[in-house]
Amino acid sequence: MVGDWPPEAGEAARRTAERYGPPDETMPSRLVWNHARPWKRVVVNRDAPEHRFPQPHQDRIEGWIDLAVPLESAADLAAFNGSIRVERTRGELAASCDVEAVNFLAVNLAHDLVTGRIDVDEARREYTEMVAGHLLGRTQPYTSGIAFEPLTAGAGTADAGEPFAPYAMPAVPPRASGRRP
């Protein structure tokens, strides 16, 4: 499956398969594990962007959870870490890094930001300090797993949005079945 992938990508796929078993979905550019507890989904990408916070690495492994992110928190999450992705309509949040433990850290700090425990500067400082500690071999709760109880799919994390009233879309009448206009 990953024979033509760069060595780092192949290694990330191997480590992920050791932990979660064979992937549920395979594509030439990525592998997907669904319901890889504690994650909702884990994705390993063949090609990954370079990321320099807090040190140079490639964002190859994505860890997804269900998390309701209020609109007012989305900008804070983006300012905290460019490797945090929010899918408000789906009610999902992802962290991407080259190490799963650092994805746990990013998701835990993202939750702390959303719930108001910390602000952006504190999140960036704690992230940098805990990544350094992880690299030095220090075990920390925030890098060992998800430190809060994630909601399950369908538990109210999705935000379908609302139409902007003055410009609401007109109702489209249903087409007659089997006939084309």
Image (cartoon, rainbow, N blue to C red):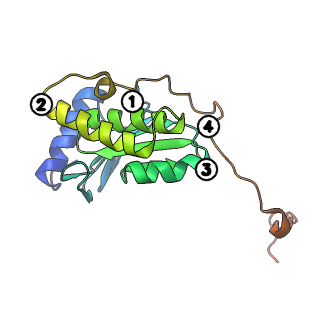
Mark 1 or 2, which is nearer the eye? Answer: 2
Q: Which mark is residue 71?
A: 3
* Residue at screen point 37% across, 49% down: 81
Task: Report how far apart the C-alphas of labels 4 and 2 lie in the structure.
Answer: 36 Å
Q: Earlier in the sequence, mark 2 or mark 3?
A: 3
| Place of residue 102 in the rendered image (x, y in percent of width and height, measured from the top left) | 28, 37
Q: Amino acid at mark 2?
A: Leu
- The residue to which callout 1 is attached is 36
Dot 4: within a 10 Å radius of its alpha carbon, few (fewer than 14), some, or many (20 or more) residues? some
Q: Which residue is mark 4?
A: 157
Residue at mark 2? 136
Of tags 3 and 4, the one toward the viewer is 3
Q: Earlier in the sequence, mark 4 or mark 2?
A: 2
Q: Is residue 39 visible?
A: yes
Closest to the observer, 21 or 150: 150
10 Å neighbourhood of mark 3: few (<14), some, or many (≥20)?
few
